[in-house]
Amino acid sequence: MSLRARLTLAVAVAVAAAIAIACAVVYVIVRGDLRGQVDDTLRNRAAAAQRAFDRPGGGLIEGPGGGFFARLPTLGQGGGDTLVQLVQSNGTVYRAPFSPISIPVDSRTRLVAGGARDAYLADATVDGVHVRVLTAPLGQGLAVQVLRPLQEVDHTLNRLALLMTLVAVGGIGLAVAAGAVVSRAALAPVRRLGNATEEVARTHDLSLRVEVEGADELGRLAVSFNEMLEELEHSVGAQRQLVADASHELRTPLTSLRTNIEVLARGEGPKGERREQLMRDLTEQLGEMSALVNDLVELARENGQQPDPEELRLDLLVADVVARAQRRAPQVRIEPDLEEASVVGVPNALERAVGNLLDNAIKWSPPGGAVEVAVHGGEVTVRDHGRGIDEADLLLVFDRFYRAPAARGMPGSGLGLAIVKQVAEQHGGSVTAESPEGGGALLRLSLNGS
């Protein structure tokens, strides 16, 4: 069953239940009121019979055949449909002369006549007629029974029940129609969302957006869907840009490798020192290619599954990276200033980021120069004393494949600092480049969770 059908059914059931309960309550109230009026009438008739019995000339009279009859005067307006009879505690019944109907007598009636039970009301069937009977004590070992037919009440209640049934059926029909309208209107945003999803799946067009109407739950769902599409569009765009940039960057070293290999493959190729130089160039180019591929793989992990972060000592991690960098570049003096600091992060990623910062500083440092590395709180700073970064390049050095004009003749892929930026953002931090006083460049990696 579709969501729309379920919502329509739920609305219809809820409205139908409300109508049914309302009809039942109305029926019970009207029934109680009508029967209450009958009961009040019976009590009044019983009281009138009591007063008539107590007056001179009331009570019992002997009939022509030696039997006794109840001698009660007319009960007044409305008494024509009310019958009265007297009952002795032994079960003897005294009716008015020529009374055509005898009210049923049972053990309860005799108990009332004997004073062992209070008055009570009960329904009964007399000659096929539904009646209401009041039995009340009269004194002198007698009870008075007053009867009134319930035909008018039952007829009214039957008509009311039929009317309530028609109202309930009509209400349920209206509820189904209203539920269909409500479900259609309520699910319109969901329908638009579904259409948009199908369109994206069919065309792969991530620029599509869903129209947002209102600030309710469905409106927030549309906003979340649009945000998801925007992130996907950004991610796919970044991947396409990465592929395009990688293709461009790989073309030059691949062309150089192919040329050198073709030269070496010729039988009349260079000999001696020239051949050894070509071999060294090939080895260097292969090393650059490996570094470039490794950097590309690292950048391609941006949207992949990342290891769970953990609490670690940032100063100890930086100390290990500094030691490895010093062994690789003995021509540069690395001066650490590491304060104890704890952060939450991925150790391998942070090691790669700090290592790239150091490699960049070492590349720009003159032989015998110093690279200053400091850890304060959740921040790592690396400063070299090379030629520095031009003002126009300070905001560009962290872009993928960007290489400043001064760096285009030096080895490197232009991805090292882009990886640092990626790691910083994955840890909720940032990285910046500065031109400090005294020359050189200062790169600042700030991490959250310190």
Image: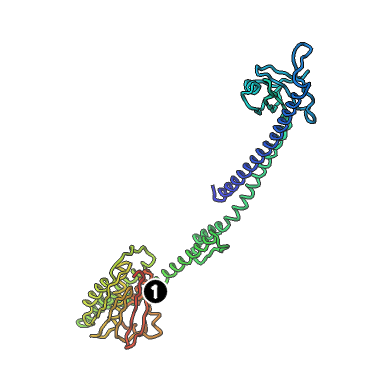
Instruction: Decide which of 95, 52 is in the foreground and name it.
Output: 52
Q: Amino acid at mark 1?
A: Asp
Outermost left residue: 272
Instruction: Decide which of 262, 138 is in the foreground and name it.
Output: 138
Q: Is residue 52 above or below residue 230?
A: above
Question: How many numbered discs?
Answer: 1
Crowd around label 1: few <14 · some 14–19 · many ≥20 (10 Å): some
Quadrant containing the C terminus in the rendered view: bottom left
Instruction: Decide which of 147, 195 is in the foreground and name it.
Output: 147
- Residue drawn at x 29%, y 74% is 355
| Position of residue 206 measured from the top left corner of the image (x, y, whole percent) | 49, 65
| Position of residue 62 measured from the top left corner of the image (x, y, whole percent) | 77, 14
| Position of residue 251 measured from the top left corner of the image (x, y, whole percent) | 36, 75
Outermost bottom residue: 438
Residue 79, by quadrant, is top right
Q: How is the image coloured?
A: rainbow
Asked whether residue 267 is in view, the answer is no
Q: Is residue 348 left or right of residue 248?
A: left
In the picture of the structure, the residue carrying the numbered disc 1 is 245
Question: What secondary structure is marked by label 1?
Answer: helix
| Position of residue 330 measured from the top left corner of the image (x, y, whole percent) | 21, 80
Q: Is residue 372 left or right of residue 169?
A: left
Q: Is residue 204 left or right of residue 146?
A: left
Q: Is residue 216 above or below residue 390?
A: above
Asked whether residue 410 is in view, the answer is yes
Residue 211, by quadrant, is bottom right
Instruction: Decide which of 339, 283 is in the foreground and name it.
Output: 339
Outermost top residue: 65
Q: Is residue 306 above or below residue 104?
A: below
Q: Is residue 440 above or below residue 12?
A: below
